[in-house]
Amino acid sequence: MKLLEGKTVAMTGGGGGLGRCYGVAMAKAGAAIAVSDINLAAAQATVDAITSAGGRAIAVQGDVTRAAAFEALFDRAEAEYGPLDVLLNIAGMFPRRALVEMSEEEWDAVIALNLKSVFLGARAAIRRMLPRKRGVVLSTASGTGIRGQPKGSAYSASKAGIIGFTRAVSLELKDTGVRINCFGPGATDTPLWRIGKSEEDIKRLLAAGYVYQPDEFSNVVVYLASDLSAPLNGEFISRDLHR
Ligand SMILES: NC(=O)c1ccc[n+]([C@@H]2O[C@H](COP(=O)([O-])OP(=O)(O)OC[C@H]3O[C@@H](n4cnc5c(N)ncnc54)[C@H](O)[C@@H]3O)[C@@H](O)[C@H]2O)c1
């Protein structure tokens, strides 16, 4: 029996570097996946990667800073594959800007995408999961939320916010059969990680071993989405090369 056999998963930011790897890994573990992204072509490329690996997936376009995107995503996922078992929040941005240069608009955009979307997604998913007494919400936080990073004040605040949000909601979910956790995959070579870095910096950091490849954390995500991780609720599971 595969770890995620029969599970319906909805994933935001599924067209990105981590989303593609996590999607393929979860599909190989038996899940059927609704892949959401604001960039439909990117979501479709993830669907193609999943189906090439023998899995089942559909692409859904949506802006996850809007509550309506989650209702549309979950309606599609449930119509296609049955009741939602797992929400995986991945969509995020990291503009890399010094505090003194950051505009109010940019701060709001980071918080809306990285943190508000987690609130909107978790609220919509948990409303569906509670009556069924089962379900998992997983969100992509970051070690940066704990240790901070230069030119990352809004990002670090949003990721720390996800950790606090997850812990608070887990207390509301005690003994309900529904659980919520978040994770930090460590610095990983994706388009998001490359933003604001010179080619020289990228080469230096890759050579120094300060960055992971996108697929390296996939099986941790599969585990967290599966019933094997049932004792975990409210946790932040992370690895961090900077520690
Ligand atoms: N790559 C890293 O080093 C790293 C480390 C720790 C945490 N993370 C987190 O992992 C997550 C994914 O990162 P990634 O490296 O795969 O990034 P990525 O840039 O490759 O993917 C992000 C995806 O989010 C999508 N997106 C952007 N705005 C959206 C919106 N409004 N609605 C829906 N989708 C939207 C993008 O189209 C993109 O496909 C982020 O939350 C990031 O903060 C990344």
Image (tube, rainbow, N blue to C red):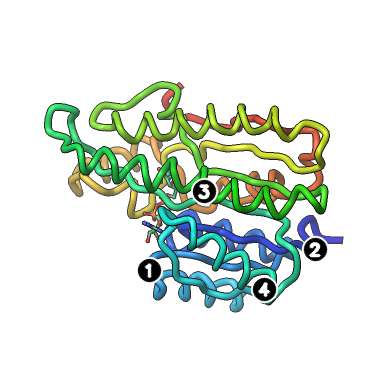
CA neighbours of label 2 inside 10 A, class few (<14), some (14 to 19), many (20+): some
Q: CA distance from mark 2 to mark 3?
A: 27 Å
Image disc number at residue 39: 1
Q: Residue furthest right?
A: 1
CA neighbours of label 3 inside 10 A, class few (<14), some (14 to 19), many (20+): some
Residue at the spot 46% in from the left edge and 35% down from the top edge: 142
Image position of 38 with respect to 234: above or below: below
**Is 154 left or right of 137, judged from the image as shown?**
left
Q: CA distance from mark 3 to mark 4?
A: 28 Å
Q: Is mark 4 within 8 Å of ligand 1?
A: no
- The three-letter amino acid code for the residue at tag 1 is Asn
Which residue is at the front of the view, 242 or 158? 158
Q: Mark 3 or mark 4: which is in front?
A: 3
Image position of 65 with respect to 36: above or below: above
Residue 236: % across, % down: 59, 30
Q: Mark 3 or mark 1: which is in front?
A: 3
Disc 4 target residue: 55
Give whichever of discs 2 and 3 has the lower sequence position. Answer: 2
Q: Is mark 1 within 8 Å of ligand 1?
A: yes
Residue 156: % across, % down: 37, 30
**Is 222 left or right of 42, judged from the image as shown?**
right
Q: Mark 4 or mark 1: which is in front?
A: 1
Residue 91: % across, % down: 44, 52
Disc 3 target residue: 120
Give whichever of discs 2 and 4 has the lower sequence position. Answer: 2
